[in-house]
Amino acid sequence: KSFGWRQPTSARNLSLVEEVACQAVFSRATDAERSCLPRHVSGTTTWLSILHRFEHLLTFDVLLGRYIEHRNGDNFSVHSTINWLGTAVSSHYVMRSGTHYAEFEITGMPSVGIVRPMPNLDSGAIGDYCLFVGHQLSGSTELYPTFLAQRSDEWSACNVHACHYNCESGDMEWTDWNIEYEFVGWEGMEGCRTGDCVGLLLNLDEGTLAVYKNNRRLGVMKGGLSGTYCWYVTIAGNDDESDAEGEGAERGEEAVTIRRAAAPL
């Protein structure tokens, strides 16, 4: 499927720059990636702007919590400023079908995963901290009603609204933002440390989320997935700077850089 996209059969109405940009999008972007891009509209949305968006598909455009910032001004990298939970979402990249792979270069022990798209969420009203997955008894679920209020038909009947890989332990956590919550192990799970690269492969045709560590496939972490999702990370500072073991962590911070890549064979 091409998700409603149709490559122009003639460049008669396109400038040379627009024609080159159009060909680049169709030759480089997969159907699944094109489904996350704006449609070409003559006089409004140019092929050059679509190509630029494609080349910057994965950025953390939504920051939730007071103590999470872009690192060195780069919108594809975030870090914590103190020991307080903050969450970053790649909200412009909405995954609707097909397979999607992203890599996360980590400092510290963050959590990386998928969450439902919430385009109308008021990030300014979130407060000091934000996490998408937490146990009812932990006192970290007060934002769940706010998240559920953003529900749309695109979420589907699947109740897995947020699911992440815990880099410290390797465990999987997921929630329906209501009463369902799991923190469980899975076959092949391993933890990660500073400098590791975590890969996540979301296959919406099969409904699975698989994990990779430094280009090595660990296994399928979660199944039964459907509907739309975005990539996200949750990070916090580290009170004990010695935990970083001198591997570039400043002030005991946690940090994550996201990038597009091809899934390892």
Image: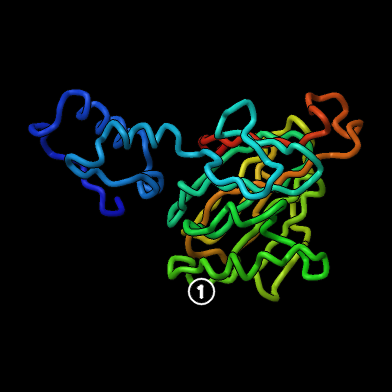
Report the side of 154 relative to 236 (left or right).
left
> Between residues 111 and 132, which one lies in front from this camera angle?
132
- Using the rendered view, name the quadrant where residue 191 is placed: top right
**Residue shown at the point (80%, 65%) measured from the top left:** 139
Q: What is the x, y in percent for residue 32?
A: 40, 48
Q: How many marks?
A: 1
Question: Can residue 35 be seen by looking at this rendering?
Answer: yes
Q: Which residue is mark 1?
A: 157
Q: Farthest left residue?
A: 12
**Residue shown at the point (24%, 43%) measured from the top left:** 40
Report crowding for label 1: few under 14, some 14 to 19, many 20 or more residues within 10 A (C-alpha): few
> Between residues 190 and 232, which one lies in front from this camera angle?
232
**Residue shown at the point (43%, 57%) measured from the top left:** 96
**Position above or below: 213 against 73:** below
**Position above or below: 70 against 184:** above
- Using the rendered view, name the quadrant where residue 173 is placed: bottom right
> Between residues 140 and 215, which one lies in front from this camera angle?
140
Q: What is the x, y in percent for residue 217?
A: 65, 43
Q: Judging from the image, what secondary structure is the residue with disc 1 in?
A: loop
